[in-house]
Amino acid sequence: MKRTGKEKSILGRINDLSHRMVLMLVFPIIISLLLMLFYAWEYHSSILRMETIAGLKTVVAEDIPGAAWNIISGRESFAESKIYVMMHDVEDTMERISEETSEENRLSLVVAGRTMETLENYVDIIRDNIDSNVPVVENEAVLVEVRDVAALVDSMLNEYIAKEIESSAKMSVSLRLVIIITAVVEVIIVIAAIWFRNRSMKKTAAFVRQPIEELEKVTALLAEGTLDARLPDTDVTELRNLTKQVNTMADDLEAMMKKSELDAKRLRKAELRTLQAQINPHFLYNTLDAIMWKAEAGEKDEVIQLTSALSNFFRISLSSGADWIPISQEKKHIEGYLKIQQTRYRDIMRYEIDIPDDIGEYYMLKLMLQPLIENALYHGIKIKRGGGMIKVEGKAEDGFLICSVSDTGSGMTESQLEELNERMRKGQPTVSEGNGGFGLVNVNMRIRLYYNQTDGLMIESNSEGTKVSFKVPLRTKEEISEHESISG
């Protein structure tokens, strides 16, 4: 199947939706926060400038005239009074504040700075008069000018503060307006996001539902015997492998039905493979129903897990036509099957798999355990009130592979057990067991046929449950005949 340009995974579509929703909601919030931070910073800076200028007012209106009087009265020298230091500090501070102030509020500080130069000139006159021993009366007249100029600077500083207060009030109004506009925009965006989310969810549901309905349709046709039915390409990434495997399964089924007559042994194998393949459409049909229900319910994680488990189930079932697979693959196969069934029967079924990894590289005939598990589920656990446990065990012992599937279901009566053992002895294949499944009789036949041994399945059953086990030679890949098909 060729990959199409429109192909996208379910998770990818959901991620796209999430990212768009986040962008829609977060972008205006970020813009509004930046605006509010800007206005808050401007407001804070204005307050700091006003505090600084308010601190200069005392120096200009009181400290500098007071220092001039102390100098004229002889209480302090120029060095002791630090009058020039005070004036220079005032001028530097006003110059710095002026650079930080907006153009419309800067004029008062500029004029105040120039007036400070006049104030400094009067102080220079006082200094020169003292150096020339001019009468104190003349310096007292200059002191009046100093006080008048200082009062003028003080009024200019008051004017600056008033303008800053007015600017701060305007910023406060602007900030309130920004908050109101942001709130309105957020409400509009939330409404738009809800609409966009609902529309996108409907499109995503349709995106998933359509190929699943196609799968249901084709698998139903396959189950009815229409083996030329095939699935079209799908744009859903998670379903591409499943679609390919279903088509491959259909191809294999159709090819097997068209094979010419072989010798008795090959014919029996072909018949058993046909019986084996009949499990797939029914099981797939039910599982796809569960996937579609969960997709419509928005349970994306469950959809992804079920789709992945189903894809692995069919991949190992097919095994490129191989009859022999590693024990690790058989274990993975039953894990996927049990995971799917537990999703459907989670309230009544529990399971446990105990097959050590150190025997995973040995080979076994494929699909020997899944039919036993299916039988335990449908004839043991499902019909028992309260459900029960299915336990799968496998181990290597003295060159043999020993496996068992036990359940805590309703068990079988002695007559039912005797009838089943009789059917296995006669070797009558059936597909009626296991609710459309492989059946214990067929597994028993395959063990005896492929392993060339008289013993197949061993069944123990009572009112507390049923245990089905088998013992076959433990084989490596090299030990399998070159005429047998294997999966690496």
Image (cartoon, rainbow, N blue to C red):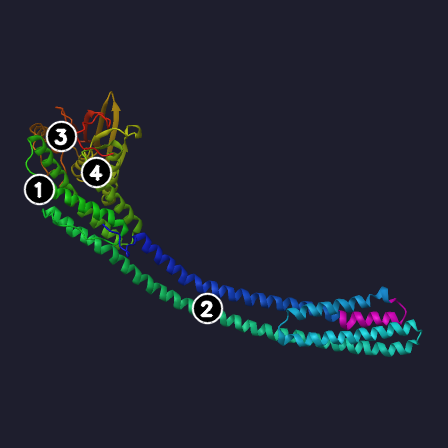
User: How far apart are labels 4 and 2 at the CA level?
Assistant: 60 Å
User: How far apart are labels 1 and 4 at the CA level?
Assistant: 20 Å
Please indicate, yes or no, whether residue 70 appears anywhere in the rendered image.
Answer: yes
Q: Hey, what amino acid is under mark 1?
A: Lys
Q: Hey, what amino acid is under mark 4?
A: Ser
> Which of label 1 and label 3 is nearer to you?
1
**Label 4 CA crowd tier, 10 Å (few <14, some 14–19, many 20+):** some
Residue at 15% of width from left, 52% of height from top? Answer: 217
Q: Give the mark nearer the N terminus: 1 vs 2.
A: 2
Q: Is residue 240 left or right of residue 70?
A: left
Q: Give the mark nearer the N terminus: 4 vs 3.
A: 4
Q: Hey, what amino acid is under mark 2?
A: Thr
Near-viewer residue (278 or 262): 262
Please name the residue that numbered disc 2 is placed on. Answer: 182
> Which of label 3 and label 2 is nearer to you?
3
**Label 3 CA crowd tier, 10 Å (few <14, some 14–19, many 20+):** many
Q: Hey, what amino acid is under mark 3?
A: Asn
Please name the residue that numbered disc 1 is placed on. Answer: 258
Identify whether 439 is placed above or below 62.
above
Q: Give the mark nearer the N terminus: 1 vs 4.
A: 1
Q: Does 305 lie within the magenta span? A: no
User: How far apart are labels 1 and 3 at the CA level?
Assistant: 26 Å
> Which of label 1 and label 2 is nearer to you?
1
Q: Which residues are magenta?
A: 59-77
Please name the residue that numbered disc 3 is placed on. Answer: 444
Please name the residue that numbered disc 4 is placed on. Answer: 319
User: How far apart are labels 4 and 3 at the CA level?
Assistant: 21 Å
| Coordinates of residue 461 in the picture (x, y in percent) | 16, 29
Q: Mark 1 falls on what kind of element? A: loop
Q: Residue furthest top?
A: 398
